Image: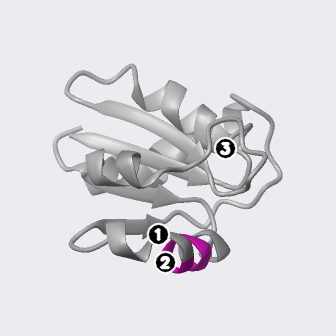
Amino acid sequence: MKLLFICSRNRLRSPTAEAVFATYEGLEVESAGLDRDAETPLSGEVIQWADIIFVMEKMHRGKLSKDFKPWLKHKRVVCLDIPDRYAYMEPALVELLKKKVLPLLGTF
């Protein structure tokens, strides 16, 4: 299963999610940011690659739909509702990600 995690600048939340879930057998994981100055800017190619797309906030879903609509056909986009107040790999963020993502993956 291929998971894509998206936040604004791809510096804290989505890279944390990528690091956490990359350790799970059977998952391929990428992360990207929606802002122009993102560490890894989002592309249509990575959207097409993903089976499930996770955004951190509702505003990310809106921007994703606006800027990448042609690539989103038949894609599952899940909003995790995780605010931008965590540091990279902060234990509270890691636990929150696991709590919100793992139930959606079924077998993990």
Foreground disc of the pair 3, 1: 1
Is residue 71 within the magenta segment? no
Q: Is residue 74 left or right of residue 61?
A: left
Inspect the image, locate mark 1, and give the three-letter code of the amino acid beneath it: Phe
Q: Of residues 24 and 41, which is closer to you in this image?
A: 41
**Element marked by disc 3:** helix
Residue at image coords 24%, 37%? 108
Q: Where is the N terminus found, in terms of image quarters?
A: top left
Give how far across and how far down residue 7 sits, in percent.
64, 54
Would you name the residue on which mark 1 appears?
68
The span shown in magenta is: 62-66
Quadrant hosting residue 67 = bottom right
Secondary structure predominantly adopted by residues drawn in magenta: helix
- Compared to 51, does 95 lie above or below? above
**Element marked by disc 2:** helix
Mark 2–mark 3 distance (CA, rounded to whole Å)? 20 Å
Dots 2, 1 in contact, CB < 8 A: yes
Mark 2–mark 1 distance (CA, rounded to whole Å)? 6 Å
Give how far across and how far down residue 56 sits, in percent.
60, 60
Residue at image coords 54%, 50%? 42
Give how far across and how far down residue 3 sits, in percent.
35, 44
Q: Is residue 67 left or right of residue 7?
A: left
Mark 3–mark 1 distance (CA, rounded to whole Å)? 21 Å
Would you name the residue on which mark 3 appears?
13
Q: Which mark is residue 65?
A: 2
Quadrant hosting residue 53 = bottom left
